[in-house]
Amino acid sequence: MRAHSARHGSEILITSAIVLIFLVLFIQFKSADILIAEIFLLSAALVGMLVGYLKLREPFYSIFLDKQKLSYNHKYGWWQLDVDNLQQVGVVSIDQAMQTLELNVVGLSLKREDEFLNKLSPRLAGRLLVEQRHYLLQAIKAYCRDGNECPPQWLVEDTEYVSQSGQKYTGLLAMFANRMKNLKFLTGYEILIPAAMLDRDIWAFSYLLHRWQRDPANTVVQLQQQLNSHSSK
């Protein structure tokens, strides 16, 4: 599955570069002074080139599904989750101001945390801690707004962690494990997959993972048939 955030990188980069070259030539050969609008267009073209470049740096495919596992591919690494280690999947939501608010992420809860953590690189763990912190803050604000006590360790994860099986973790992996524990308490899920990493909306992806959890082999076959059908059009 190709993430929405990784699409159209080359088109944006090329278009912005052409616009930039045209503007530079136009400004260079015209006799009048540079206008504010032209400076704005130059800045926009430079930003467009940067956006296109960053999109091209993203992995071509962000999610892989096969009969045994789900793989999450990130430019800083990857993590894997075996189908028999997936306990629950759903769209993450919180109660806020007397209404339910979706966080625009799909949540996964695990049966065996050690099996997941032992395959996670510290580099990716550290990056996800930063990228997904705002989801944690939204969940904390909703919980504390109801008058509940908010432990300070929710905001700064500890660098030591002992799993339920007794395995010890330190550093970034321990911080990520503590984040998983806090998310589990606040949302019911330990792992988050943002909508930007998906090729479909969060509800459709959640439904897909439900099907995959029940029948991995058949779901993968159907998904491959759909991809082949789209590519042939």
Image (spheres, rainbow, N blue to C red):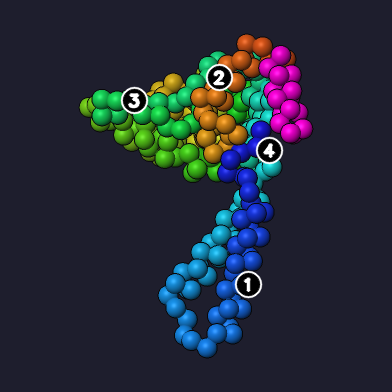
Magenta region's main secondary structure? helix
Q: CA distance from mark 4 to mark 1?
A: 32 Å
Q: Which residues are magenta?
A: 218-233
Q: Most extreme residue toward the left, as rendered? A: 147
The answer to whether marks 3 and 2 mark residues whose Cβ atoms lie closer than 8 Å is no
Residue identifier under label 1: 21
Quick check: 5 above or below 213?
A: below
Left or right: where 19 falls relative to 61: left
Q: Badges 4 and 1: C-beta atoms under 8 Å apart?
A: no
Indicate yes or no whether the magenta region holds residue 214.
no
Query: Pointer 3: what residue?
Result: 100
Numbered badge on residue 61 = 4
**Please, what is the three-letter code of the amino acid marked with disc 4?**
Tyr
- Mark 4 to mark 2: distance in Å? 20 Å
Q: Amino acid at mark 3?
A: Thr
Q: Earlier in the sequence, mark 3 or mark 4?
A: 4
- Kindly identify which residue carries mark 2: 207
Q: Nearer the viewer, residue 20 or 219?
A: 20
Which of disc 1 and disc 2 is earlier in sequence? 1
